[in-house]
Amino acid sequence: MVDIDTDSRAFLPALDVQDQPLAHALQIDGRAPFSRIAEVLGVSDQTVARRYTRLRTTSTLRVVGLTDPLRVGDTWFVRVRCTPDAAGSVGEALARHPDTSWVKLTSGGTEIICNVRTHEPGHPGESDALLLQKLPRTPRVVDVSAHSLLHVFFGRKRSAAGKSGPLTPEQVAALTPADAPACRPDEPAAPYPLDARDHRLLAVLAQDGRAPLGELAAATGWSQTTVRRRLAELRAAGVLYFDLDYHPRILQHGFRATLWLQVEPARLDAVGRALAEHPEVPFAAATTGTTNLFASISTQSAGSFYRYLTGPVASLPGVQHASTAPTHRILKGPGPRWPQAGAAAKS
């Protein structure tokens, strides 16, 4: 494999060096008790609690509880081309919608790329109306294309922080939750049924992945013991995972881009697995469409991205065509929209 320049490895967003171990620890287990994180990091409980509280209250990062899109619904990668004067307002509208995530302005602000999720596999809902009906009729929208998520090679619980984070393998092992999924994260799994209480539980966790058991019990009507057991069940099944949601202003550091590849079907799996090993790739997935492989790229600079594109990507066998779109501005990450995210991202 072609060597990758170390200056191209932009893994953790721009955090203070003292906060990076905490961020890595929370990426491994977002609900780990502060006492356990403190023990692994070699600091006091109060230090961990104080640092997380500061990061949370200053809108730097938060822990969010998310569901595997291939287990509880369908996910679409949507590309919206607009006139330059409309992309910002359309992007803001998409970011406000509860069923969108990773809303980005790309290509100099003329294109929007986002994820749109349906609530149940194969059951149309409001997301489908947004995707198939509202967007094409929106004034100054030039073109809309949608690509269904088929398979995730890297992403969800598997974070880029794990490729380069500051924690040692021993620290990672000490923080890995006991109820981690038994199956490999890239193995296909059947849709997982959820009831109304599950949805209430997940709605609270989407807002605050570290919500106390008492708050989760109040939202669901379960006892705290039942909540604890259900959390363990959902995590062990690979349905629920915890992620870090950085404020868009934090994600503006470095150079980010979207990569769309057209790959020979016989080599798609091998290329996807190879991309998953690249330190520049925080997310890679197979999709429907002529370009059948989607990847998010994070590097330190445009020059680093060029070296990555002409080195490791160019060396992948079976790639017939590549299309790139640099990220102009991030309006929304994996969790619910941050308050005034659009305004903060511009600062």
Image: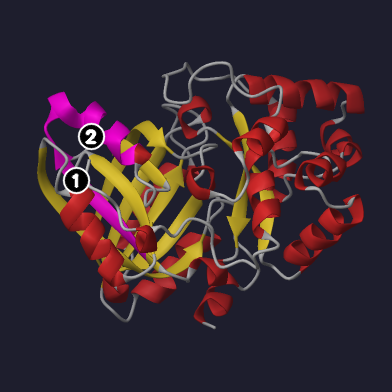
Magenta segment includes 266: yes
Res 103 seen here: yes
Crowding at mark 2 (Cα within 10 Å: few <14, some 14-19, many 20+): many
Give the answer, above or below, for where 8 lies relative to 206.
Answer: below
Nearest to the observer: residue 54 or residue 96: 54
Determine which of the numbered discs, if any, sits on residue 261 in the image. 1
Residue 22 left/right relative to 340: right
Q: Quadrant of the C terminus?
A: bottom right
Magenta segment includes 100: no
Crowding at mark 1 (Cα within 10 Å: few <14, some 14-19, many 20+): many
Query: How many numbered badges does the structure rendering display?
Result: 2
Res 132 seen here: no
Ranked by sequence position, the earlier of labels 1 and 2 is: 1
**For the magenta stretch, what is the residue range?**
256-276
Q: Residue at x 35, y 61 (%)?
A: 8
Tell me the kind of residue under disc 1: Leu
Label 1: element kind: strand
Tell me the kind of residue under disc 2: Val
